[in-house]
Each structure stands twice: as C-alpha cells, then as structure tokens.
Image (spheres, rainbow, N blue to C red):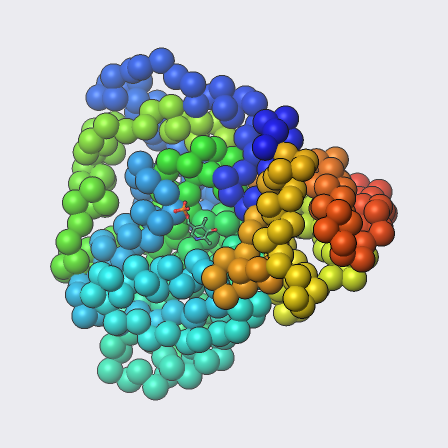
Amino acid sequence: MSFQNPVFIPGPTNMPEDVRKACDMPTLDHRSPLFGAILHPCLDNVRKVLKSEAAQVFLFPSTGTGGWETAISNTLSPGDTVLAARNGMFSHRWIDMCQRHGLKVRIVETPWGEGIPTARFEEILTADTGHEIKVVLATHNETATGVRSDIAAVRRAIDAAKHPAMLFVDGVSSIGSMDFRFDEWGVDVAVTGSQKGFMLPAGLAILGFSDRAVQAGRTATLPRTFFDIQDMAKGYANNAFPYTPPVGLMNGLRYSSSLLLEEGLENVFARHHRIAEGVRRAVSAWGLELCAVDASVQSDTVSAIRTPAGFDASRIVAHAAERYGVAFGTGLGEVAGKVFRIGHLGSLTDVMTLAGLATAEMVMADLGLNIRLGSGVAAAQDYYRGHALQAKKAA
Ligand SMILES: *Cc1c(COP(=O)(O)O)cnc(C)c1O
C-alpha cells in the first residue's frame, strides 16, 4: 500500500488532514468542564446529522458492531422476536448477533443485490396479530452489495400493518453520506460508527435512540454493562462517561460533524450522489454490471461490481494493492470472488475518484479482462464535467 494514495474501501474512509489533527489532543481531565465542551457539541451535531429534534445520542468507545449490540441489549429481553431481511453480509451479521443474544429472528431471505422486501414485511407484520415481533431491523445500506433500502417504505409497512414494533436502522455506511431522516421515518434506534461518513478513525459507536427505545430499556432484561445507555446518560448529565472516554476521537467527531453541517447535509448527499454516478457510468462503460439489481437500490456510498463469470474478483483487490498501492473492497460472504467494491464515501473528490477508476482499469487490463484503458475514466469525466457541483448555502 502507499500512504499517498486515497483508499477506495467503504470504510474506514479517507480522513481530511484537519480532522486527523483534531483527534490529536493532549491529555485532559475527562471529569472536568473541558470534556463537557467536547461532549455536548458532539451530541448536538450528531442529532442534526440524524435529522432529529429529540433523539438521545450516545457515543461508545466501540465500532458499528458495538452499536448493534447497544441497540438490542438496551431494548430487548431473551426470547423476544425481531424481524430482519438477510440480503448481504452486514444484515447477516446483525441477525447472527441477535441469535447469539438469545433472540428469535424472523429472517426473510432476500437475494443479495435486492433491497428490503417491504411488501413481505407488511404481510408478516399484519399476520403477527399477537405482536410477537418487538423490533424490525433494517440495514439502510448493505455495504457488501452496494444496495440502499428504502427506510421510509419500511416505516410505511409497519404502519400499514398497524403494528407496534420498533424500527432499528443500521446506518453505518449511510449516515452522514446519504439522506437519513430519524424523525420523519419514525426510527427508534439508528446505529453508525466513526470511520465511515464521519471520516474519523474507527473507535466510536454512534447511536440515536427515540424516547420509546429508551423507555423499552426499563423492562428489557438482556444483560448490558459496558453498553448500558442509562449509565451513559447519567454520565452525560455530569459532563462525563461511566468510564474513560476516547477524548481525541470525540474531539475529532466534534470537528468532522461540524464540517458536514457547514457543507450542508443536502450538499453532502448531492456530492456523494454525483461521485457515485460517475463511478456507475464508468462501470457501464466497462461493460460490467453492479450487484445492485436496479437503479432504485444503487448505493451512493459503495458500488459492488460483478466481474465476468469464472473470474475471481478478489484478484483485482490483491493486484491493485500489490502493484499500484491502492485499496479496493473485496467481496464478502455469498458474493466473495464475484464482486469487487469501490467505496466512495467520506472525504472524496471527483479527482480522487478518477484516479481510483484509472487504477481499476489498469488492474483489470493487467489481469486480462477486456477493458479499454480510459473508457470508464472518460465516461466519469463526461459526467463530472456536465454536473459541476452547485453547492447550496447550508441552512
Ligand atoms: C462497516 C459496517 C458495519 C460494521 O461496523 P464496524 O465499525 O466494522 O463494527 C455494520 N454495518 C454496515 C452497514 C457497515 O457498513
């Protein structure tokens, strides 16, 4: 790998230099007001990024996976039932975690490349007249397949079934990069991590809880200690943590979240969409297909690209790293060897993206795939030239 090249993996993402510097802090007393001056702007900014007025925001020293555990362990009891679609590696892992916690998971097996089957969810919820299902789990953006699901439609399915289940959303690879509406979509718990849209090193689980999800914790009996949101809330009330907080990372979050808000969330989303669209133009110029089955589910943060049958896609990732010092994402689970992934979220520009596309072309040509050098780059250039960023003033 070369430290000079950007990475094109869907997390951890590239870090702006000033975000890195914001993480570099001298030791400070985390029980002093100095810490509160870092903590509270983080909580306020994250709430804004989630598009929520009232969500309670929690930050744990962890990653997105710890965020999943925080969500379920604070709201559910052993034997409770949750509903989830399995359409990629990340939805699979959240399901697996629920099972290991003694929850029953009503799994809707869904082809990898498709989004959450909301009509099927509505049928299942309508049939669940005893309200066994306590929570609907939804992976907003399946990072393994580059598929974005429609969370508003999941909410409509729950409401149409007149079902009281809560809605928990894994937004690890969408929040801070693609439109996310905690309040409007009636989300009860949103989960993300520091190393994707927030452009930080890994190390923080970032969550929003609705009042209802917080209240569910009063009767839920799954064990929780490190990830107990009640302990955390008590800490926050005193400008503190129940244990030692990762102050540098949190100072980084204070800074990176303010960058997102200054750019304006709608501008951030538009930038991700543009960059992604350039990548998609390149993929189609190469004559390749996305894993995402159609345009309605294509992710603006990661593209999973199918390689021709019989060709092991992981060779692209290995060769790019060895020969050109560039990181692409490998295929996971069911699509291992069948796709390679270009991550395009976080701190990224047109110019960086063009370099990634040019590298992918060299790699594929080296490995004997029928790719004309420059074809994808030219398609992306055409798109970027014709769609210059017109930033709207942040509200
Ligand atoms: C990265 C990712 C995770 C896992 O997060 P970690 O921070 O690696 O624990 C979970 N869900 C999705 C959708 C992801 O992209």
Residue at 63 percent of width and 69 percent of height: 293
Residue at 27 percent of width and 65 percent of height: 99
> Quarter of the image holding residue 218?
bottom left
Residue 90 seen in the figure: yes
> Quarter of the image holding residue 222?
bottom left
Rendered location of residue 199, percent (x, y): 51, 35
Residue at 61 percent of width and 39 percent of height: 321
Q: What is the number of callouts on the image? A: 0
Side (left or right) of 299 relative to 53: right
Q: Is residue 312 above or below residue 360?
A: below
Q: Quadrant of the N terminus?
A: top right
Side (left or right) of 218 relative to 147: left
Rendered location of residue 224, percent (x, y): 17, 50
Rendered location of residue 149, percent (x, y): 53, 64
Instruction: Choose between 362 and 265: the one closer to the eye.
Output: 362
Side (left or right) of 204 relative to 233: right
Residue at 80 percent of width and 57 percent of height: 370
Q: Residue furthest top?
A: 26
Rendered location of residue 19, percent (x, y): 51, 25
Q: Quadrant of the C terminus?
A: top right
Q: Is residue 227 above or below residue 25?
A: below
Instruction: Choose between 319 and 66: the one closer to the eye.
Output: 319
Residue 215 seen in the figure: no
